Image: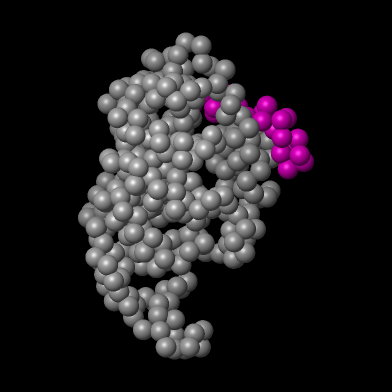
Amino acid sequence: MRIGMALNYAGGFKETVAELADYEKAGLDVVFVAEAYSFDAVSQMGYIAARTERLRIASGILPIYSRTPTLLAMTAAGLDYVSDGRFVLGLGASGPQVVEGFHGVPYTAPLGRTREIVEICRRVWRRERLTYEGRHYTVPLPAGPGTGLGKPLKLINHPVRDRIPIVIAAIGPKNVELAAELAEGWQPIFYLPERAADVWGASLAAGKARRDPATGELEVIAQAALAIGDDVSDLLELGRPVAALYIGGMGARGGNFYNDLARRYGYEKEAERIQDLYLDGRKDEAAALVPRELLERTSLIGPEGYVRERLRAMRESGVTTVNVTPLGRTHEERLRLVEKVAELAS
């Protein structure tokens, strides 16, 4: 099982990147760089490429609505070039609050758009002269919508790889099915290994049934907070505000994917009440209602034996990479946690 880590640069981006060399030596395999509505992820990943040697560098995620498909392909090829073939293109639909609220574009047809973007990216990387007629994207743009002067072009540069790995972040049934069909990897959130088969098994099976064998085995990337010791259980409480934000605040009533996931995990009543409280502005009360069981079973927090057991459960459920958030107070403590989890996962 590989070990990944989401880049958390609350203390300063450049300072955090300077520490990545230590994490490389400690056994970290891949670093994920988020993009929400802060600094863009692309400039930061280019900086990381220059400061690291072995780490895979993944976007986690680039929203599919904020760039054209060909720009996503060009960006991925450029990052793969400057990193000497270490880039992973993480894609996701984000949500209407960010897409419409910050980018000002309609949040429409996430499944169809994702499929077409993947197809276009792979054509660009193969340096095909690009012509594409899809439901959502047409390249070149014909007369009418455009001037009619566009002509099919191909990427000028020769990419380092003509098949850059694509990871799709997804939790909805149809989105997961699409990831299992098309992508090299799938990244869920709040991954609970004991319920994964019940919640996603049918979608994964349906997608894999249509999967091109040339794509290889599906990489499954789960996320988990990490703390190892006999006296670390209180750190579970750090996950409450984040879980409440997603379950309660990431979307409106009837339009919150994470709330739907909590319900599918069996926490229907809790999910409903958390959302009601959160949307009423009672965030602390909402956080208090996040089931401790959910926090425990989606994390790697506890004694060494417990963490080893949770890693085994993840592996047996199909996880190939665990994306950890080490909860150490200092860089040295976080480094030791990554070293230890890499040892336990080997």
- Asked whether, in this view, residue 122 is left or right of residue 147, the answer is left
Quadrant for the C terminus in the image: top left
Taking the magenta stretch, the answer to whether it contains residue 342 is no
Quarter holding residue 324: top left
Quadrant for the N terminus in the image: top left
Q: Is residue 78 visible?
A: yes
Which colour assignment does the render follow? one colour
Residue 159 on image: x %, y %: 26, 62
Residue 67 on image: x %, y %: 48, 64
Taking the magenta stretch, the answer to whether it contains residue 295 is yes
Residue 287 on image: x %, y %: 66, 30
Residue 149 on image: x %, y %: 42, 88
Quarter holding residue 10: top right
Residue at 40% x, 36% y: name it: 18
Position of residue 166 relative to residue 194, above or below, is below
- Asked whether, in this view, residue 192 is left or right of residue 164, the answer is right
Position of residue 253 relative to residue 325, above or below, is below
Residue at 38% x, 45% y: name it: 48
Residue at 44% x, 81% y: name it: 141
Q: Is residue 184 visible?
A: no
Q: Nearer the viewer, residue 71 or 145?
A: 71
Residue at 44% x, 20% y: name it: 333
Q: Which stretch appears magenta?
A: 277-297
